Amino acid sequence: MTQFLSLLLNGISLGAIYALIALGFVVIFKASEVVSFTQGSLLLLGAYAIARLSDPLGFYLAALVGIAITALAAFVIERLIINRLRGAPVISLAIVTIGVDIILLTELIRRIGSDILNVPHPWGGDSVQIGDVGISENRLIAIIVAGLLIALFFLAFKFSSWGVAMRASAEDGETAALMGIRLGRVSALAWVVAGILTGVAALFLVGSPTPGVSPSAYTVALRAFPAAILGGLDSTGGALVGGLLIGVAESLAAGYQDDLLFLGRGFGDVVPYIVMIAVLLVRPSGLFGTRELTRV
Amino acid sequence: MDGVSAAADVRSDVPPVLVEDVTVRFGAITALSQVSFTVEPGTIHAIIGPNGAGKSTMFNVLSGVYKAAEGQVRFGEHRLDRMRPYQIAGIGVARSFQNIALSPAQSVAENLMLGRHHLTRAGFVAAGLRLPRATREGRVHGGRVAEIAEFLDLGDKLHTPVGVLSYGDQKRVEVARALCTEPRLLLLDEPVAGMNAEETDRMAEAVLEIRSALGISVILVEHDMGMVMSLADRVTVLDFGRRIADGTPAEVQSDPEVIRAYLGSGDEIDPSEAAEAAAAAHPSETPGTTS
Amino acid sequence: MSESTATATATRGATRRAGRTAPAPRRSYLRPLLLAVALLVLLALPLYVEEFWLRTGFAVAGAIVGAIGLNLLVGTTGQLSLAHAFFLAVGAVTYTFVAGESGGIGLADLRGLGWPPLVGMVAGVLLAGLAGLLFSPIAARLRGIYLGVASLALVFIGQHVLNSWTQVTGGFNGRSTPEFSLFGFTFGNTDPDLFVLEVPFREAERLWYLGLALALAAYVFARNLLRSRPGRALETLRDSEVAASVMGVNVQRYKGRVFLVSSMYAGLSGVMYALSIGSIAPESFGLELSVLYLAMIVLGGLGSVGGAALGALFVSALPLVFQRYADALPLVGGAGEGGLAPGEAARYLFGLAIILVVLFQPTGLAGLAARFRRRGRDPGGGPADRSASATSDSTTSVPSDPPAQGSTS
């Protein structure tokens, strides 16, 4: 039972990180109809920047600057490329983000090489005990920060003028434009928000129990994609639920790995994808996604 | 040939369309509420109404794109409300789209050949290997497609990509593609929207010819009141998803509720003008005016 | 049932505009002639060209097959898939398992059926198809963009299986591929020894012809497919699913079918890949391979069979060429020398090329070639010039006049 609770708590913490990435993914999709395959390399960029800047700037400043760099990169991608493709087929938009991803990822992997860059989190690798259940301090802080950030996001989404504009343009871009909402600005802001969320996710993803920044962080970040899809690509709430679901499922599968050995070692890594397929079989638009209403 | 009795040569296999108490909801919004009407075989039946009245929704129900929450749509022994769009196409119900839904990079001929889809059989293997039956099928149906293109003045544009055609030509390709399915029931969604006066007249002429030569039923959604009043044998008027009138063009025009609906919304027609148009452009006279 | 009514309209149409027939597209005799010459050159090449180029040629042929298959799905039908690497893996592993022998290498205890390689190849294609069929309940129901992310799943699950199912796949280290043979004629260096015009025809030469034949067959099949009933249905459902279904196309079935065909192409491509490398290893079939295939069809031109072939040539040959001429190229150098490794240089180029193509040349190399051809024939360019760049969204760009108000009479 203790093991189960521990895995559950760790799963939730991992899920909170996934949820941040998935939220960014969903925000971008809602604002600009882009399925951004760049999120994985953006996350790696954030992690790399934080790791490299920690030495000269100190951890806290490095974290802030690293997150800002991630947001800035997202902003530049939107302005330079996505913004020029307004109205292009969804599939071209997705493909162009893959192009960006290839370049960014190649550059980062070249820079990181086979090293594992250390991020000197002040809380280090300590873990805390809650009753019998143990969790790394890093992950506990991740839950709290992610929770606050997500709450802030939902408030902004609901009440700020940006949130209203974004929901309006996701609903019906043409009408929103007629009402004076500047789609370009909404889209740019969405990318910035996604960049921030991804940067924060990077900060915690490379902390304990993960040893540091290595190219494998990219693969981990990709598991947030199933989270976004199974929640429903256009549902912010779905991204949250999807992230948690994926995190918990992965953590449980990894924890009970010995009982699942017949499925092969490292089975936990593919569990997110299996969960996604299972959900899509039943609900092709995800758990909370709206079925697209065809207008003819 | 005048009015309702125009359908002298109705095809024997064209049954009436019975729309009975059809209701369509999107979430909390009721787009259609208990709408009923009947389309007699071989007639031209118009559905009109102000913007947002539910005309397009009705078309989407008839062609199987939307599912009705309640009510039924019968076409002979078939229940259209229970069928998928491709099945509905398979029993001879064809539709043109208001917002052109053609493949712009394909030629006119290729777009029209799609209309032959349910009449042809070639599958992936037969087509990929160019089996004799696939090529023969393509040849035979290509001939028929050329005839239909000719009929709608598209004969010299068969090999032109649709994307470079004028708007009026694209609208005609829409109608031609629907005709290529050899329909028993033809649904035309605003076939003359955005056309100039001359193109409109030619389209009206074509619709009359289709009906008289093929003996099929035509359901028409149209904003152009002149066209509706001159072509239609019968008119159903929708407003806010309800049927507010149903009758001959003359009956509908004098219906107080129809007048109120149109005046109230400040939309589309001045009833008196429409009446004038109907009187001026009666079906029997249209062909003479343009040819 | 339609015959009588058909003639009714036909006669009307005919009497109204008697004698005017539609001009068929111009046919030039230059084209078949050029094709014949090109084919001859390709057939004669092993007599003159060294082994490196022939091996590269076979790798390119395998990529061409795979790219054509992916293009049917992504370019023609508008269904984004990142699972292509998975289906290549299914083909490659099946071939290796069916044609390979049982035996142990080091600690690994490998299984194999030891059947004729041709059976292995066919099995590879069929099994990849079967895998596609199993996934098609999902593939057929998802809209293009959902499929893009969902298909990621297959790549990662595939990686896991490749790493874990050691007896069949060789596990982490992979296993070597049995050489191909056709009715006793092996595509190896000997058995039988073969000389043509005193040039020894060894493995590279033999595989070259195999690749040529398979790529050509894949090309012709896809071309035929696109020019006929199923192809039209697929293109229409990319442009508008609703229009396609209303015109009688069973959209779900067609999406499933094209997924099946595409994965069979991938299966064949996987078998060729295994033959070309000589071994299979899990890391070869990762997400990166899927992305490379996507790069091929985007650069070549989405929806164009010839474009896919061009893109495959470019993307699969470039890293090999970089590798060979690493010394001669500026910037590119050995990994340790501070320069870019050849693979990295190629990846930068692909990424950049994808972005530039989507931004400035959405029809890819095929579109460029078409424009070039037209310019040769018709200096003015003419209105048809725009047709090639008409992408799937151009329906919406048609000036949509407001509905005519009131009466037009």
Image: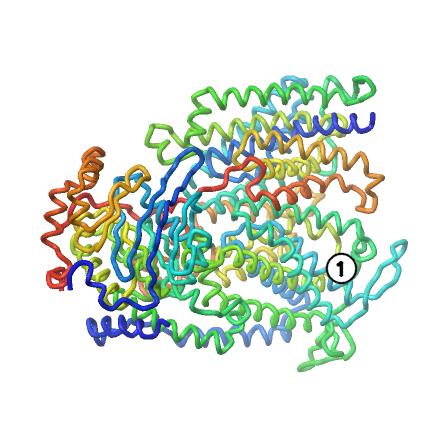
Residue C286 vs residue B141, the one in the foreground: B141
Q: Say whether residue B156 is visible.
A: no
* Residue A102: percent from left, percent from top: 59, 43
Rendered image quadrant of residue A120: top right
Residue lying furthest bottom in this view?
Answer: C197
Query: Residue, x 15% and y 61% (percent of image)?
Result: B2
**Tally of numbered discs:** 1
Query: Residue, x 21% and y 72% (percent of image)?
Result: C17
Rendered image quadrant of residue A197: top right
Q: Say whether residue B106 is visible.
A: yes
Query: Residue, x 68% and y 19% (percent of image)?
Result: A59
**C87 on left or right of B21:** right
* Residue A149: percent from left, percent from top: 59, 21
**C124 on left or right of C35:** right
Residue A215 vs residue A294, the one in the foreground: A294
According to the picture, the residue beneath numbered tag 1 turns out to be C279
**A35 on left or right of B266:** right
Chain of the residue under label 1: C
* Residue B205: percent from left, percent from top: 19, 61
Q: Residues within 10 Å of mark 1 (few under 14, many from 20)?
A: many
* Residue C292: percent from left, percent from top: 60, 51
Amino acid carrying label 1: it is Ser
Rendered image quadrant of residue A162: top left
Query: Residue, x 66% and y 60% (percent of image)?
Result: C130
- Describe the element under mark 1 as helix, strand or loop: strand
Figure coloring: rainbow
Q: Quadrant of the N terminus of chain C?
A: bottom left
Residue B41 vs residue C205, the one in the foreground: B41
